Image (spheres, grey):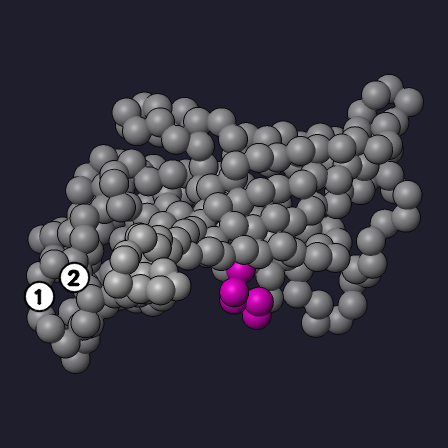
Amino acid sequence: MAAPTGGKAAGLSRATLAIHQPPTDLGGSMGGLMGEVKFQFNPSQVQLGRSASWTVMPAIAYTRGAPPKFTGAQPASLQLQVFLDASGTPSSTTVQTQVELLLSCCEVTEQSVAAKAPSPPWVEFSWGSFSTVQFVAYVTSVNANYTLFSPNGVPLRATCTLALVEVSSETKRQNPTSGALSARRVHRTVAGDTLASLAWREYGDATRWRTIAEANAIDDPMRLRPGTELLLPAASEGLV
C-alpha cells in the first residue's frame, strides 16, 4: 500500500489531534494535555457535518403545511483518517503507541474517575489555518486497520478512522458591554492547570493571568491546587 502524499515540504502545516483531560465541572474547559497525535501524512479528505432541527406541526389554516419551527442546532461531526507508518524503522513501536493513544479517547481517564466526574478525554483537531474544523470535541469511535507487521508481530503500519462530535457550547458569548456578572463562569482546576494556561484558554493571552488572580484573591499564583473552583471573569474585565 502506497503512503498518502505529504512529504516534508517547506512551510507545510501538519495536522494534529490534541488529547486533553476532560473537565471536572459542568461547562468547564479542557484539562491538561494527555498526549498529541501528530499526523505523518495530512488527511486526503475530511468529512465535516452540521445539521439543524426543524418541526412542522399540522395546521388547518395552511394549505401546504404550517411554517416550520426551528428547534435547535446539532453539534458538528467530523470524520477523518490517520495514516501511521514506521516501516522504515522495523524496531519502532511508534505505530502501536499512537494507536493505543487514539483508542484511549474512548475510555474514561483515571483523573476524571478520581474527581468523581468520569469521562473519556476531550480532543481538538487542528490543521494550519483550517479553522472550520478547530473545535473541542469528543471521540465516538476509533477503528484501526493494521496493514503491516514486523517479523516479531509489532505493528508497523496502520490506518485509523476517527469520528468526532463537537462539544456543545453557548451560541454566542454574552455582550461584553452589558457588565452583567453572568458573563463570568466557574472552572474547577485539574492537575497541570496554571493561571497562565487558564488565561490562554479563556482569553488567548497568557499574560492576563492576573485578571483571574485578582478575581479569586490569589496571592501566590504558584500554589494552585487541583479541585479549586476559580471564577473566570468575562474577557472584557480587567482591560484598560
Magenta stretch in the rendered image: 129-133
Q: Which numbered dot is residue 180?
A: 1
Viewer can see residue 35: yes
Image quadrant containing the N terminus: top right
Report the Cα–Cα distance between label 1 and label 2. Answer: 6 Å
Image quadrant containing the C terminus: bottom left
Q: Is residue 114 above or below residue 64?
A: above
**In the image, 27: left or right of 165?**
left
Q: Residue at x 16, y 69 (%)?
A: 237
Give the quarter of the image for residue 11: bottom right
Element carrying mark 1:
loop
Q: Residue at x 63, y 30 (%)?
A: 100
Give the quarter of the image for residue 46: bottom right
Q: Residue at x 66, y 60 (%)?
A: 14
Q: Which x, y percent locates residue 107?
A: 49, 27
Q: Is residue 217 above or below residue 103?
A: below
Please tell me which residue lies in front, 9 or 4.
4
* Residue of label 2: 183
Q: Which x, y percent locates residue 29?
A: 32, 48
Amino acid on which disc 2 is placed: Ala
Asked whether disc 1 touches disc 2, contact meaning CB atoms under 8 Å apart, the reply is yes
Q: Which x, y percent locates residue 118?
A: 35, 27
Magenta span has 130? yes
Viewer can see residue 18: no
Give the quarter of the image for residue 142: top right
